[in-house]
Structures are given as structure tokens and as C-alpha cells.
Image (cartoon, rainbow, N blue to C red):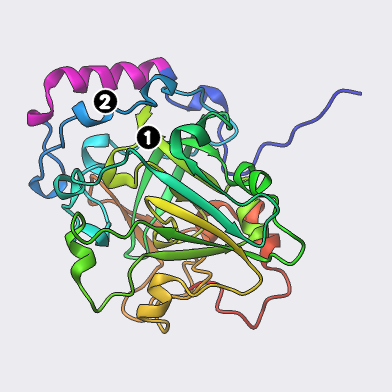
Amino acid sequence: MPTIRKRPSWALPESAVTPEEVFLNRRQILAGLGAGAAIGLGGGLMPSPARAESDPSAGLYPAPRNEAFTVERAITPETVSSTYNNFYEFGSHKQIARAAQALQIRPWEIVIDGLCDNPQTIGIDDLLKKVSLEERVYRLRCVEAWAMTVPWTGFPFADLVRLASPTTDAKYVRMETFLDPDTASGQRARWYPWPYVEGLTLAEATNELAFLVTGVYGKPAARQFGAPLRLAVPWKYGFKSIKSIVRFSFTAERPVSFWEEVQASEYGFWANVNPEVPHPRWSQATERLLGSDERVPTRLFNGYGDQVADLYTGMDGERLFM
């Protein structure tokens, strides 16, 4: 009998998605205009694309788009999304794109350790040889009530979990970003618990939506997006998507994440999107789409409930949504 494939509720037919050749042509036109002419949100200039072009992995992009992961919203223009970024390592404001160019992303080694049968230290380019890259269009919902839609390139988190081969005692994966206060001025702020730490359960990390990102907009990820390796978990608030990862540790104990340690009453471990659970200082019922003043209703699990809601059954005592 033929296989019947059920499309996720948030997916669109291929005809409703911007064709890849149109998207790529638009990118080429923008590149031809020159970086100095691209003014981003808040008046910041687009960083020079020359840094991305020198990335040794540049030949891997653009990767084929996985049409199972598309959304109903238009892709946020790169000139907007690349100049409005949270990256506290480089400052607490949004216009950190220029400062983030100081981050050296080669060499870049990633430690895989903890409760796993295959601990190792691996360079980012060697890791890329072990996986197949694809492009996925995801919504991103920030806890600050703004949102964007981004074409990420990367590979399923589950592929890294298989590479590590966690033991049966492992229940969580703890992730850690780089620590270099000489380069990242924000890390000189001693009131923050550097380095940035995040965590997922193994069930979350191996869910089909959990994605490790190496590129965006059809090319290697710019530094302000979290190059050379970041997380995308689109059903959670954006602060869960840790940037510039250098360590994955498999553990039996639930890790304490960066913002949970800073202010646990406002930022919990789970941080799943829910319009009915307000942040202590603002409503989460609506969100502002970057690049416009349009506000739209927030959706439970950011619209990805069909794929992730079952991860949280029987957990009524947990603060799942903040």
C-alpha cells in the first residue's frame, strides 16, 4: 500500500512558499547593492558580507530546503533580522551586529562529554562532514513579544545525539557558549553568570523540530546570529536557542539555564510559548512582527503544538510556559 504522509498543521503546500530561486535572486540583488546601503532596524548598518564569504564552509550553502518545515508568514528581510539581535555577550541592546564581528569562529572546537559513550572534541568543519545540511523556515518568538521568520540551515539535533551516543542514565543535554571577555565586552559584566548555559531534555533534543543551525539566508550564519553553531527550538521562547555553542554535556540532572539563574521568577527552564501565560511584566497574548508595527496573536507552542505537546503530558506541576 502507498505511504500516506500527514503534513504538520503549520506547514504549507510548496506552492504557497517563496520559491528558492526567487529567494536566492533577492539575496544576490541585495549583495550587489553593497552592505553600506542596507540600513537595518534602529539605523544600524549591515555588517560586511566579506566575513561570511571567507568562511571555509561557504561551499555548503545554499542547502536544499526541507519543504516539511515551512510556515505561513513571509520571511523576515535579512536587513532587519541581522541588525536586531539579542546577544548579551556583546551588549544588552539590540544593535550588536557590528560588535559581534569581533568573534573569531575559526578554529572552533566543540566538546561533547558527560554521560555518553562517544565523548570527543571536534572542530566545526569536521562536524559538518558528519551531517547533511538542509534549510528549514521557522518562526522565532522572543520572550520580549517580538517575532521573526527565518530560513535556517543546519541539521537535526538528533544527529548530534546519535554521534554522542548518550548512556541510559542521561536525561538532559546541557549546552554552553564560548567564554572570551577580551573579545565579547558583555562578558565583562560580572553580574551575569557567564558563560551562557541552556538545556533540554533528551526527548526535546531528539524531537524532529530541534535543529542545530550553521547557516541562515542561504549562507554561513553571520556572527550576530550565533555563528558557527546555534540552536533553534521554535516552540520555545528565543532565549532557549543558545548561540555560538562550544559544549554539549549529557547529564542525569536538569541544568540551570543562564536566565533561570539570573531571574528564575521570570525565566524558567521550559519556556514554551503560551499566549495565556503572561510574563510578570507584560502580556504574551500578541507579538510584533519585526520590520513592521503589525501585531498578531501569539499561538500556543508558537504554532508547533502538534509536534511537541506530547513532550509535556503528565507535567502539570511544572512551570512549562515561563
Viewer-side residue, 287 vs 220: 220
User: Which quadrant would the N terminus be assigned to in this image?
Assistant: top right
Residue 70 visible here: no
Mark 2: which amino acid? Ser
Q: Which residues are magenta?
A: 21-37
Tell me which residue sits at (49%, 75%) in the image: 256
Along the viewing direction, whichever of 80 and 161 lies nearer the viewer? 161
Secondary structure under tag 2 reads loop
Q: Quadrant of residue 89?
A: bottom left
Seen at 40% across and 15% down, the residue is 21
Tag nearer the camera, 1 or 2: 2
Q: Which image quadrant is residue 196 in?
A: bottom left
Check the image and name the residue furthest to the right. 1
Which residue is depicted at the point 17% across and 61% down? Answer: 185
Q: Which residue was labeled with disc 1?
A: 216
Determine which quarter of the picture holds residue 266.
Answer: bottom left
Residue 160: % across, % down: 60, 45
